[in-house]
Amino acid sequence: MIQFLLNRELRTEHALDPNITALNYLREHLGKSGTKEGCASGDCGACTVVVGELDNERVRYRSLNSCLTFVASLHGKQLITVEDLKHQGQLHSVQQAMVDCHGSQCGFCTPGFVMSLFALQKNSSGFDKADTLEALAGNLCRCTGYRPIIDAAEQACCQKQPDQFDAFEPQTVAQLKAIAPQDTAELNSGDKRCLLPLTVADLADIYAANPEARLLAGGTDLALEVTQFHRELPVMIYVGHIEAMKRVEVTAESIEIGAATALSDCYAALAQDYPDFGELLHRFASLQIRNQGTLGGNIGNASPIGDAPPLLIALGAQIVLRKGNSSRTLPIEDYFLDYKVTARQEAEFIEKIIVPRQQANQAFRAYKVSKRLDDDISAVCAAFNLVVEDGVVHSARIAFGGMAAIPKRAAACEAALKGAVLNQSQIELACAALAEDFTPLSDFRASKEYRLLVAQNLLRKCFLELQAADVETRVSAYV
Ligand SMILES: Cc1cc2nc3c(=O)[nH]c(=O)nc-3n(C[C@H](O)[C@H](O)[C@H](O)COP(=O)(O)OP(=O)(O)OC[C@H]3O[C@@H](n4cnc5c(N)ncnc54)[C@H](O)[C@@H]3O)c2cc1C
Ligand code: FES
Ligand code: FES
């Protein structure tokens, strides 16, 4: 049985197919067709809804793609759809702003935009263009053009007034507390089940008892198996209620990130030490996907074009894997064995990711090359982690995504740099070595020739940036 709030109405579902997405639940079970289906793959934003979660004595609102959200993951939360915004016969201020600024033509994308704007307004204290572009990057409109929609964002954020969600917030907090999960929940129908443990120990036990289960974190990858490939997932275990796996702890030595931490919540700690990691996370999918997709899921799906793994490999991150009562710690680079083959054993899961803190003289650069700036998958993703002292490379950890069947270190390139004076001619030797490291594939994202050239050019770009930044690394002294 799962329970959640549909706006302020309590919904209790005893028997529901756990493979149903929130989008299909709204449209097909409840007949609420305001939320639209454009792509069912997280690309268009037409299905955007807002989910409220308890955050101390407040409700934290975030936009999500309902097409990628399995309904079971709403347990204990508040689901707000476009139908909930109009109040006492009055449009919500974000809806009114869309009308006033002519932000809609055919209207198919409009509910999704409205919900992204609603989440933006809830989380802002004024208009900020960069935040607006970030909030809307996961919403596509093919007829209006974005300027009027950005104007609507400006109006909605500048003229923000308390709304019915603010007025009812104390009641909503009380309702959310009343339905806060207290124990492992289960949603099932026929022979399909989704189990929702609350602790790491319960997850370990439940997974050991159901080793065939698929782990469900944000579902931004897993849900595609249902919505795009029309597969059935008979048993899922949802990890998103396990608080210990959603924590980010920063110590003097490391940044420890629970595997179920949403990508949006990883941002601050990673960007603090490694600004390029932050910049790359800004370009990771869309805000909706970063609000639900997790760091553990990005590693767990073992995609050769996943964005976080090359950066984590270059940083020398480790992952803690848990199975039953035992845990082991593995350098993340040893996790990826072959295309979609990992070192994860049956019933083993990623509990957390440990990223070393920045050290003196360390230069970290990361780049993503994709066809579109926002909401696109990498053709090549590169990460360079160099420790340079007095112009000499003391250590080099370089990793790429999109260049092989797995995210992989560039051993020959690293060897060409390690111990060498960092100058243009050494960089050219290291660029040549990249051809020994990788034999990339051609696909619809990029040809193999393009991939190799881009990888080499990203190394050159890294060198030029370090030269420009100079100072501690004193790179330019040796050019
Ligand atoms: C439109 C769109 C754009 C995207 N853009 C990007 C992008 O720019 N860059 C990028 O890298 N990815 C991108 N992705 C892929 C996806 O969003 C990410 O990989 C995300 O981090 C997956 O996290 P999740 O929590 O949603 O994983 P889920 O879908 O829940 O799980 C993914 C896989 O990992 C497994 N898993 C989950 N948690 C664990 C765990 N703790 N231990 C072991 N296995 C686990 C699951 O069983 C599943 O096999 C995109 C996806 C979509 C739909
Ligand atoms: S329907 Fe396109 S993102 Fe969900
Ligand atoms: S108004 Fe038609 S797609 Fe946006």
Image (cartoon, grey):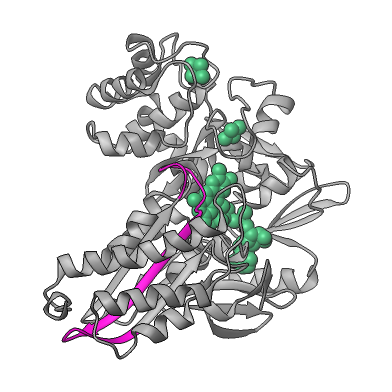
Q: Is residue 82 left or right of residue 221?
A: left
Which residue lies most toward the bottom here? Answer: 419
Reply above or below: 188 against 4.
Answer: below
Residue at 45 percent of width and 47 percent of height: 54
Reply above or below: 380 against 372.
Answer: below
Residue at 34 percent of width and 74 percent of height: 428
Which residue lies most toward the right here? Answer: 190
For the C terminus, the quadrant is bottom left
> Residue 432 magenta-drawn?
no
Where on the picture, by quarter, is residue 427? bottom left
Residue at 66 percent of width and 78 percent of height: 343
Q: Position of residue 462 (x, y in %)?
A: 29, 66
Where on the picture, by quarter, is residue 118? top left
Q: Is residue 415 left or right of residue 195?
A: left
> Residue 376 magenta-drawn?
yes
Residue at 46 percent of width and 28 percent of height: 115
Q: Nearer the viewer, residue 34 or 438?
A: 438
- The part of the chain drawn in magenta is 370-395
Q: Is residue 88 left or right of residue 477?
A: right
Which quadrant of the picture is home to ligand 1? bottom right
Where on the picture, by quarter, is residue 341? bottom right
Q: Position of residue 446 (x, y in %)?
A: 54, 51
Reply above or below: 16 against 436.
Answer: above
